[in-house]
Image (spheres, rainbow, N blue to C red):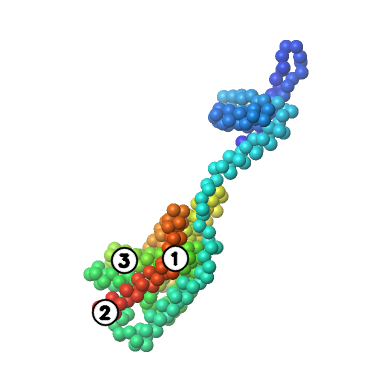
Amino acid sequence: MCLPLRCTPVYAGPMTEEPLVLAGVYESLTRAACDERAFVLNAVGIASVIEYDGFNYRLAVWAGDLPAATGHLRAYNAERRAARAPRIAVPAEHVHSIPWLGTVFYVLILLGVARAISSGLWPAQAFDNGVLDALAVRSGQWWRAWTALTLHWDGAHLMANLGGGLWFGTLAARQLGNGWAWLMIVTAAAAANLFDAHFGPAWYHSAGASTAVFAALGLMAAHAWRTRYYLPQRRVLRWAPLVGGVILLGWLGSAGEGTDLIAHVMGFTLGGVLGAVAAVPAINALLNRVPQWISGALALASLAAAWTLALTH
């Protein structure tokens, strides 16, 4: 650290009683750090000495050179900090336009499935064929992990998930783009359903887009955290998105009677894993090579394929 320290009188020699005063400009636990800064000062014509008090090494200059030495060392430290700052292309949150487009499809799909079943457009057993049934999934009906995301027990359940998906889905699409955001949301939520079906109780049944809602929350929180990881800022700011996401998970994911907390936690966790991976610069560069409409089409295709299997079995 650079600061004026104690001053030490040094006598020029036996022929004079006039003391020359040394003023400290830097202290360190290592000699090498002082040597480095002494070299910097010597390059601009400022003489210095290094003292050791048994604990710290101290770089000192003549008192008359103190202002100039302090200025040079401050400039040197600023250059070192700038040199250490990573030159990394950080994914920008604002580059993705119309982030609400994906949520339009989200709303249309949830309302469309509800309408198709309630109006009799689809077979009466469509709901039973699409709901997440642990025993059925274990017997090979893996598509239920996708179809269950579009089914709801009642109107209130549907409205709650529409609101949550609109909010978190739009924010996630703002960071990753509509196509990649929704492909990751659907994939993470379906994977969470598969995990619950295979490792939960055999009687486990579930339906609803809430797993996808919390996958979107985890995706956006982890992506923002990992993006900030590369920025030169305080640790509390860097971790704020992930901490905020966990707080929202605890607040919203455990509210209400009959809440499937395990599904919400798994959705958030798997969404977070995908979000963190997508924010790695090398991975982000690869994702940017794929048009958003292709990844969005894959998300729609996975749901369409799942429902095709559900309606034909």
Q: Are dots 2 and 1 in contact, CB under 8 Å? A: no
The C terminus lies in quadrant: bottom left
To which residue does mark 3 refer? 194
Residue 167, position in %: x, y?
50, 70
271 or 211, which lies in front?
A: 271
How many numbered marks are there?
A: 3
Residue at screen point 44% across, 60% down? 289
Q: Secondary structure at mark 1?
A: loop
Q: Secondary structure at mark 2?
A: loop
Which is nearer the N-term, disc 2 or disc 1? 1
Closer to the observer: label 3 or label 2?
2
Which is nearer the N-term, disc 3 or disc 2? 3
Residue 221, position in %: x, y?
48, 60
* Residue 142 in which image quadrant: bottom left
To which residue does mark 1 refer? 291
Q: Amino acid at mark 2?
A: Thr
To which residue does mark 2 refer? 312
The N terminus lies in quadrant: top right
* Residue 150 in which image quadrant: bottom left
Instruction: Let me know if residue 247 appears in the view.
Output: no
